[in-house]
Amino acid sequence: MGTAGAGNEPTVGDRRQLINVAYRLLGSLTEAEDAVQEAYARWYALPRGRQEETVSPGAWLTTVTGRVCLDVLGSARARRERYVGAWLPEPLPAHTERDGPGAGLADPADQMVLDESVTMAFLVVLESLTPAERVAFVLHDVFRYPFAEIADILRRTPAACKQLAASGRRRVRDARTRAAPAVQADVVRQVKAAWERKDIAALVDLLDPAAVMTADGGGRAGTVLRPVEGGGRIAPYMVAIADKAPGLELLERSVNGAPGLVARRDGVVVTVAAFDVAEGRVSRIWVVRNPEKLRPWVG
């Protein structure tokens, strides 16, 4: 864990780890960055003697960040009840696919590790967990923190934290990636081609009959306020969007580490779509249009 003493300071690696933890806990890069900033502010507010007594600044910051995230999660449900339409996590680009010149190491999006634990399917299911379940599950199952440390964050016993993580694990089990990346990329590519052709029949064939499309405009961009259910309803809706939005450029991009689509108008990203593919068909589509959630795509 390290030795206390002079020069005992957080490292760049600590910050990167905290951003990764906080994003998975909150589903929002903006809120994750705020939580980490708050943790660092509390660290630098400590008397120098307290800092030098701290064996591991990284562990201290993780505890504080976890508690800040827990508070945010506790208030998030009330805020999201007032949200216009469906709330979806903020989509993340691969740092090699940023659509602008501003990408850099200082940007929190560039510090994200994109793996199975940040897919849109995974993050959406995490939203159904209680705040304590989410913290226990993410810290233990994703980041391998011991329950003794998680207990310090949640202010519960290690045994109670173990039960919380187990409960979360049961609920997210079905959110694991089901299609291989190459298969998903091929299906998404076919969806793009059919959408560009405005081919409803082809889209219906690519969509599971029970597919669901959820869109997030946040009241800042026009979109459906409720999920659209059924491939037979989603396909004509997608074509209607194409008819109403001439000039859109559709691009294949990595969205939260998985194949997805990005729509640009006049070079500006206006929509990011993530997909879940099972048995060769699209089962879920998550569409983010709220410009506040598309900042990482601007660069």
Image: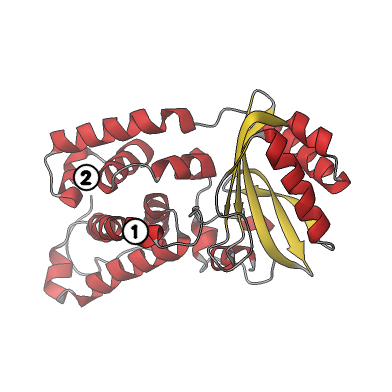
Question: Which residue is depicted at the point 54% across and 32% down?
Answer: 177
- Front residue of 226/123: it is 226
Element under disc 1: helix
Residue 261 screen position, x and y as percent: 70, 49
Query: Where does label 1 land, which residue?
Result: 76
Q: Quadrant of residue 236?
A: top right
Q: Do the residues under discs 2 and 1 have CB atoms within 8 angstroms?
A: no
Q: Disc 2 or disc 1, which is closer to the eye? A: 1
Q: Earlier in the sequence, mark 2 or mark 1?
A: 1
**23 vs 127: above or below:** below
Residue 212 screen position, x and y as percent: 59, 38
Q: Residue furthest top?
A: 279
Query: Where does label 2 land, which residue?
Result: 150
Residue 155 horizontal side relative to residue 239, left or right:
left
**283 vs 129: above or below:** above
Which quarter of the rendering shows the C terminus? bottom right
Question: Which residue is depicted at the point 53% across and 44% down?
Answer: 120
Question: Which residue is depicted at the point 45% across and 62% down?
Answer: 83
Kind of residue indicated by mark 2: Ile
Residue 81 horizontal side relative to residue 86, left or right:
left
Residue 248 screen position, x and y as percent: 80, 60
Residue 53 screen position, x and y as percent: 12, 64
